[in-house]
Image: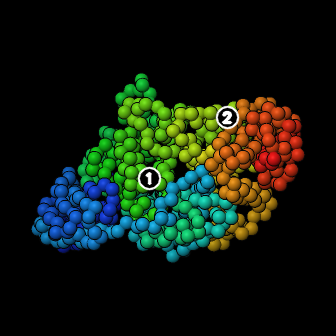
Amino acid sequence: MLLSASPTLAAPPAKPGSAAAKTAARIDPTYWFVGMKNPKLQLLVNAPGIAADQVTLATYPGVTLDGFQKLESSNYLIVNLTVSPQAQPGKLQLKFAGAKPFTYSYELRPRNADPARTQGLTQADFIYFLMPDRFSNGDPKNDVVKGTRVNHIARDSMYARHGGDLKGIENHFDYIKQLGATTIWPTPIIENDMPKASYHGYAVTDCYKVDPRYGTNAEYVQFVKAAHGQGLKVVQDIVLNHWGSYHHLFLDKPAADWFHAFPTFTRSNYNAFTLNDPYASKRDRILENDGWFDTTMPDVNQSNPLVSTYLIQNFLWWVEATGLDGYRIDTYPYSEPKFLMDWGKAIGEEYPKLALFGEAWEGTEAEQAFFAQNIFPPVNGFKSNLPGVLDFQICFGISDVLKGDGGDLNKLYHALQGDWMYVDATRNVPFLDNHDMSRFYSVIGEDFSKFKMGIAWLLTLRGTPQLYYGTEVLMKNFSNPDGKVREDFPGGFAGDKTNYFVNRPGQAGEAFDYVSKLANYRKAHPVLSSGKLMQFIPQDGVYTYFRYNDAGECVMVIANNTKEAKKVDGTRYAERTDGFTSGTEVVTGASIADLKTLTVPAHTAWVVELKK
């Protein structure tokens, strides 16, 4: 596939200058806000033949027209405005003078001052990560939307749409709260109008529109508001690096340099380490940043300042329009490094409370830390301003430790030991699995004891933990292909024989109860979210750490990762246990009468609240 060639399903454009062309003008952002810290506003105007027009602005106090700019395509025009702090909400009258003059009424809205909006995340939060299409169908009326390229559902196909939506998630807020989660992170809810396999949401086709199979923009705003009303936060999953090949700005490009192009189709080499390799070739770095992520995901050229501004404004717009609480950034290392710094600075200055964490799927602690705020000097001109990352090192450490007969506990120990490289490692997001990985329960051989160990670590380590939907009821499978780990949640769809939202028999129920008990304990005991952490080097298959605070609260997490019970000399932990005489295992309620001699059963993690 030649990158310079556009797919063929675009609707034929109206004739330049026609009435249809003028009345169908589109402007991104679709509206804007008064009182933004950056007064500059770039409008991308799209209409057939619009480049031939002259633009004027009717007098509007506090707003000035800074000029307009033609692009390579005759169907686009950039209009630059300054919206001063004195500007008031209302509608600007932008006059386009050409063969068919017209006036566009562009809205400036007030900013929302509700203090419950854009709360951000802390370690006290617990993120529930789900795929809207596969979680629950709350509104069958939007299963098939006229005009979309995929206008059917087929639940027996792992690549087709299944019908889940925003209403389906909202219908189960109570379930999420019962689990002990405080935050909902859906995979991208923005329009993915691709001809196939775009249920996952990572091939955006319209940056300013919710996918109609999930709901409308207005319904998404209400979704966020309803979540906040239930004490739940919302993280929006976003993609900076690439769009879908049926994105309207790719089907009809404003200019060729809005996307990276090679003589023939060229993938990324997926080697983010080239960005901090002092010996890396220029070619390898270019391939990593500029190569396409996939055949249907064109790589956006963020080094083009017009594209950079378009993207920055888009993600400011979504925060202000909805009040969401955080962004998870997909494929973070693949974006252009300078753009990442500009984007992070702009978002952080406008919304300092907004949580930001990125996907940096790297193999070592140092590689992962490079893509978060860290103690390193700039490398090749890049210095990350991203507060946190998805903690793949914790994920790998837990999985490796629990595979087979029991792995080396030092892998988990060292995943935490590497925290010295971060400005604040507590802003990282540890997890057990996700939509791209084999499910945790399968990875550990469907061993329920090991499952509980993994959950105990996830919910007691530093950071803001994330759980992938269905893990709490032992959903399983290997990601070969990845559709097998993206199955429908039982009970989320009409006709399901099993409904785990209301009835969880057997070990599925035990698993849910274990997660819920520990997550809700964590919510009620800030020592597990804001307390300090001290770990002891693993010995004889036993790994122990403590969460503690200056108020004298202390929780001990001690895990035996062997096939037999272990007698542990508790005096080794006197540094943290002095002054405490006993403890209570918080999930089972069992009493630990003697802290000096501990006998921990095989493949067991205790979470022990220490008592004086």
Q: Earlier in the sequence, mark 2 or mark 1?
A: 1
| Residue type at numbered disc 2 | Tyr
Colour approach in the figure? rainbow
Percent across and percent down for residue 408 are 72, 32
| Residue type at numbered disc 1 | Pro
* Residue 202 against residue 575 in the figure, above or below: below
Quadrant of the rendered image containing residue 279: top left
Percent across and percent down for residue 39 are 28, 57
Q: Is residue 497 left or right of residue 590?
A: left
- Depth check: give the residue in front, 94 or 574: 574
Q: Is residue 391 left or right of residue 278?
A: right
- State which quarter of the image contains the N terminus: top left
How far is the residue under mark 2 from the one under mark 1?
32 Å
Q: Is residue 35 left or right of residue 411?
A: left
Q: Residue at x 55, y 46 (%)?
A: 427
Percent across and percent down for residue 204 are 42, 56
Q: Is residue 532 left or right of residue 287?
A: right
Label 2: element kind: helix
Q: Residue at x 66, y 41 (%)?
A: 533
Classify mark 1: residues with Cα within 10 Å, few (<14), some (14-19) or many (20+). some
Classify mark 2: residues with Cα within 10 Å, few (<14), some (14-19) or many (20+). many
Picture disc at residue 433:
none
Q: Which residue in the protein does label 1 denote?
A: 352
Percent across and percent down for residue 142 are 49, 72
